[in-house]
Amino acid sequence: MVGVRRFDEEEVLGRAEAVFRSHGYEATSMLDLSRATGVQRGSLYNAYGDKEELFLRTFARYEARFLATAAEALSAPDVRAGLAAFFDAAIANMTAGPARGCLSTRLASEGDAPGPRVCGEVRALLLRLEQLLQDAFARAAPPPVLPPAAAARMVITFTRGLAVMERVHGDPAALAATAADVVDLLLPPPPSA
């Protein structure tokens, strides 16, 4: 049957995500994606049109999963514990295999090369994450040492650096220790009795 997909889209998008994480957007070819997914290039073009559309579908899946995990962690009643859980989840995501880093950070480091639609999606993800963080910091008691918006931006910037360090060192324990330091800086622990 012409036009009928003969592949598991979730599996294809998952494998495509691994390729984009590993090579970035610009360096990934449709041939790379075809080899990784086991789907012929013609079938990928028929299903998605081009690399950008395949990437956008892959990124939407990644974004939904990432933001759901972040929202769950940051909704904890204890904002300090929620921020720590957010960092734990981010580190687990980055270190779930060979040095992967973070897909959005990987793309951001490519500058404008991926094109306006892809760059726009990365910016939108970071703005959504920033809002989740700002909302969490706004309900923290005691409040963070910075205004909620500034604390949220600091965490966004820190997580981009964390992703780079994961690719350089691949040491989850060191990443977790640094993340714990950031939690302590932004939301100092209560004084000991």
Image (cartoon, helix red, strand yellow):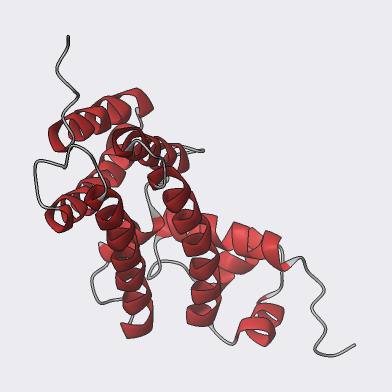
Residue 74, compared with residue 2, is above or below; it is above
Q: Residue at x 61, y 58 (%)?
A: 14
Residue placed most toward the observer, 163 or 28:
163
Residue furthest toward the left? 146
Q: Nearer the viewer, residue 128 or 157?
A: 128
7 left or right, relative to 29? right
Residue 34 drawn at (x, y percent): 63, 68
Point out the residue furthest to the top here.
193
Q: Residue at x 68, y 83 (%)?
A: 47
How many badges with numbers are in the image? Answer: 0
Outermost residue toward the right in this view: 1
- Quadrant the N terminus occupies: bottom right
Query: Is residue 5 shown above or below 75?
Result: below
Check the image and report above or below for 84 versus 75: above
Q: Is residue 33 left or right of residue 79?
A: right
In depth, the one of 154 and 25 nearer the eye is 154
Which is nearer the eye, 47 or 138? 138
Q: Is 7 displayed left or right of 185 in the figure?
A: right
What quarter of the picture does the C terminus occupy? top left
Give the image quarter of residue 149. bottom left
Name the spot of residue 56 as percent of width and height, x first: 49, 75
Can the viewer see residue 73 in this picture? yes
Vertical side of 3 occupied by 118: above or below? above
User: Which percent across, then down, holds residue 164?
Assistant: 27, 45
Can residue 114 be seen here? The reply is no
Provide residue 100's location: percent of width, then percent of height. Answer: 42, 46
Q: Residue furthest bottom?
A: 2
Quadrant of residue 45 in the image? Answer: bottom right
